[in-house]
Structures are given as structure tokens and as C-alpha cells.
Amino acid sequence: MTEDRSTPDDAQRPEGEPRFSFTDKRKVNPEDGSVRPTGDTPAPEGQVADETVDPFDAEAAELFEQAAAGGDESSLPADAGRVAELEGRVTELTEQLKRDQAEYVNSRRRIEGAAQVSKDAAIAGVLGSLIGVLDDVSLGRQHGDIVEGTPFHAIAQKLEEVLGSHGLTRFGEVGEEFDPNLHEALMHEDSEDAETTTVSLVMQPGYRMGERVLRPARVGTRGPA
């Protein structure tokens, strides 16, 4: 209940009685039982209701009306351009990733190849240093110093097996065709009935590891005159 200094008329009000007015804020209309809208009862006719409109609500309502009328299509070209830019960036990064992967694979192959070459060179160095020991074993067998069934024979056989497991093989036999890449001819004998040059005498066998010749076979040859 609030005091109202404008109504009612003084003629209808006893002298000295204050002026008052009432505002009906009930949510249900007592006459028909309907639910009233949220807020105060509308101002009487002839009076302006004191209602303040939130500017954010007004802007939201305006945007909603624009969207309902067909939407704001001004942003579509910008969105399409952004999508195209991102797709181009994805393509660029994908190509860069492929190039990096190829470079990594090639680099890894080069590293592994260099490591294998270094490993083979190290093994070849060790095997080459043991060729002299194998020469002594071979001479011992020829002179009867290493007889089968003795401990020396077992040790020599085991040594040869271990070196063979690392790719060491011996070559140079009488009757082989002479190959300057494998044989070193220390002497030669002409023969009228020979059609090709062959090994006629093995002075020292040769050794190789795979395709790598560690020592050529020192031989005597026989060939056409």
C-alpha cells in the first residue's frame, strides 16, 4: 500500500484523512481464475506504466527476428574462406609429414648401412688377424703334429668352426681356373695341351669373408703357351 497525493478527490475524502492507492499484484485473476502475466497489473487507463526494457533483451529479440526471417548470410563467405584456408593448411602439413617420413626412412637406411659396413670391417679385421694361426694349423696337419683324436685337433677344429660362423671361407685348390681377383700367381708353366690357365700348385690358401677377399691364394699356374 502506497500513499497517493493525486487521488481521490478532496470532496469524497473526509478532511485530514490521507490519500492511498492499491496495486493488485496477485498472479491469479480473482474474477475468472486465469493466470496473469508476470509483473504488476497494467496501469489504469490514462497512466503510463513505468517499465524499463533491458537493452540486451532488445538486441537478442532483434537478432532472433533476423534469424527467423532467413538468417544472417553475411558470415557465410567468411566461413567458407576460413574452411578453404584450413583445408589448404591440412594438405600442406600432410605433404610435409610425408616428406619428413621419407627423409627419416632414408636417413635410417643410411645409418644402418654405415653401421653394417663398420661391423663387417671390424669382423674382417679380426678374421684377417687370425689367418696366420690357420696357416700354422694347416702346416701342423701336414706334418702330423695335429692328429685326429688329440686335444690339439679338437681345439683347431673348434677354432675353424667359430671363424666359419662369421663367414670365413678358404679357397684355392689345384685344378681351379685362375682368377686374378682371387689368386696370386707366383709361378707359371706353359702347356701345349692346356686350353685355359688353371691352378697347378697351391703354396698358400686364400681366405675371404663373403665377397670380401681377406687374402688371395698364392698359387702356381699352368696355361697355354
Image (spheres, helix red, strand yellow):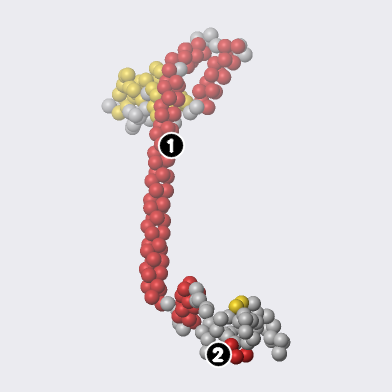
Viewer-nearest residue: 223 or 212 = 212
Against 102, residue 17 (above or below) is below
Residue 199 in view here: no
Element type at mark 2: loop
Amino acid on which the number 1 mark rests in the picture: Glu
Amino acid on which the number 2 mark rests in the picture: Glu
Q: Which residue is mark 1?
A: 112
Against 216, residue 101 (above or below) is below
Viewer-nearest residue: 44 or 57 = 44
Query: Measured from the top left, where is residue 112 in percent x and y?
Result: 43, 36
- Identify the residue at horizontal 51%, vertical 84% (top origin): 48
- Mark 2 vs mark 1, CA separation in Å: 97 Å
- Identify the residue at horizontal 37%, vertical 23% (top origin): 216
Q: In what quadrant of the picture does the C terminus appear?
A: top left
- Identify the residue at horizontal 60%, vertical 91% (top origin): 11
Q: Which mark is residue 45?
A: 2
- Identify the residue at horizontal 37%, vertical 73% (top origin): 77
Viewer-nearest residue: 140 or 41 = 41
Q: Which mark is residue 84?
A: none
Residue 210 in view here: yes
Side of 126 relative to 9 (left or right) = left
